[in-house]
Amino acid sequence: MSDAHETAGTPREHHTSQDKSLAVQAAMLDSADELAALRDLFALHDDSVYLDGNSLGALPRHVPERVQDVITRQWGELRIRSWTEGGWWTAPERIGDRIAPLVGAGPGQIVVGDSTSVNVFKAVVGAVRLLDPAEPARDEILVDATTFPTDGYIARSAARMTGLPIVPVDPEKLLGALGPRTAVVLVNHVDFRTGRLHDLPGITAAVHEAGALAVWDLCHSAGALPVGLDAQGVDLAVGCTYKYLNGGPGSPAFLYVAERHQARFDSPLPGWNAHTDPFAMSPDFTAADGAVRGRVGTPDILSMLALEAALDVWEGVSLAAVREKSLALTDFFLECVEAYAPPGRVRSLTPAAHAERGSQIALRCAEAPAVMAALIARGIVGDLRRPDVLRFGFTPLYTRFADAERAARALGEVLTEVPAED
Ligand SMILES: Cc1ncc(COP(=O)(O)O)c(C=O)c1O
């Protein structure tokens, strides 16, 4: 056991047995874990503990060979024929259909491409354009005040372009802010900083009750927990694929437009890929039907097909099991932190209630920059959100309970080495 507990004035023997019991508990939880075998699908051979899958998911081991084939055979040998014979041209909607069941969407509603930021733009402006022109008084765009910054920046630009005022609202106060002027609401499903899970069913229902449209950012929930886009009647949604979907650095994002809105969805970026007959090369734009309408320009095939390969790891995986393990992992990590960290040095910002928790734990710690640097030096990879938040992401497909225990133990040790700021 670390000196942390000695300096905190607790007898060493007590903590030695406690350490053992948490380590033993971790081993038992790992051996009972029905998802445990999935870890072997990932390139996680080194001795580090990777708790940053909420930022960049780990590499599925089979992806390099598949990408190699895309480069050497499809590009190198088939060359331009791959656009048709290799299925490159239809990859954005084909891969959208692979993501769809992971976020509770039926086929034909998701298209993959561009960054999340670009898709936020398409979704917010597209939602404003879906409004009923007979209701001009419905003119406010409500934006999650705690949002990942890009959503706020893009929404403000969308507001300037559409002439609608923007109203930042804390998601916890959102229901009270809805009214006859609410046009579009943009919310994050899980707060990137705190890991708080927002009530997608309740908020979506209330937004509809108010006569407005709900746009959700699923970056921190897609692949981490069940989303239920169709069942909850979400209007539009965006999400990235490089976190819990393990698509690789900068892998393309996705856009969901519910089927009932597709015929009227008027993309603010109607590139030639969204044309009903792109190779007619017509000077006039006629939008394609369905999810294709959300496309813009030539897809980034190398990233796109790396993502497609990465999605193979989801074959036969139950999202309910993923959610159950995610909650068990985060509960267990919190229990270990409570046991190992010197009192008063860290405080969880992530809600204790399961219904309000995503798949990460955020700990407030005054010395967070030095603590995270020391953790990474010991092979415990989480990340820092300045100035004082330590983030630890738990990816149920490959994170073990033993990783949670080891990370919390290292945190306890590091906290004894990094002096507390008063
Ligand atoms: C909630 C959220 N939205 C948007 C983004 C930005 O996505 P992109 O860089 O793909 O535009 C991120 C990135 O981490 C995010 O966490």
Image (cartoon, grey):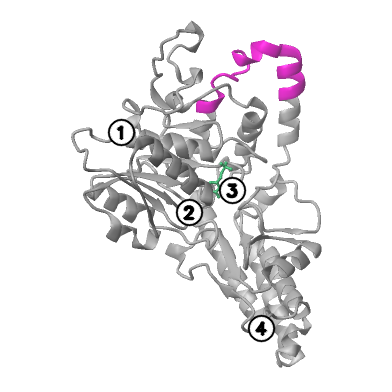
Indicate yes or no: mark 1 CB to ligand 1 under 8 Å.
Answer: no
Give the residue type at disc 2.
Thr
Disc 3 versus disc 4: distance between alpha carbons? 37 Å
Taking 68 as reference, is 283 left or right?
Answer: left
- Residue linked to disc 4: 422
* Disc on res. 147: 2
Give the residue type at disc 3.
Tyr
State the extent of the magenta-drawn residues as a range. Answer: 70-93
Q: Residues within 10 Å of mark 2 (few under 14, many from 20)?
A: many
Q: Residues within 10 Å of mark 3 (few under 14, many from 20)?
A: many
Q: Residues within 10 Å of mark 4 (few under 14, many from 20)?
A: few
Disc 1 versus disc 3: distance between alpha carbons? 31 Å
Q: Quick check: marks 3 and 4 in contact, CB under 8 Å?
A: no
Taking 36 as reference, is 200 left or right?
Answer: left
Indicate yes or no: mark 2 CB to ligand 1 under 8 Å.
Answer: yes
Taking 182 as reference, is 349 left or right?
Answer: right
Comparing labels 4 and 2, the label whose residue is closer to the camera:
4
Going from N to C along the chain, the mark reached first, 1 or 3, is 1
- Residue linked to disc 3: 244
Give the structural element (helix, strand or loop) at label 4: loop
Going from N to C along the chain, the mark reached first, 4 or 1, is 1
Going from N to C along the chain, the mark reached first, 4 or 2, is 2
Q: Vertically, is 159 above or below 12?
A: above
- Residue linked to disc 1: 130
Q: Quick check: marks 1 and 2 in contact, CB under 8 Å?
A: no
Give the residue type at disc 1.
Leu
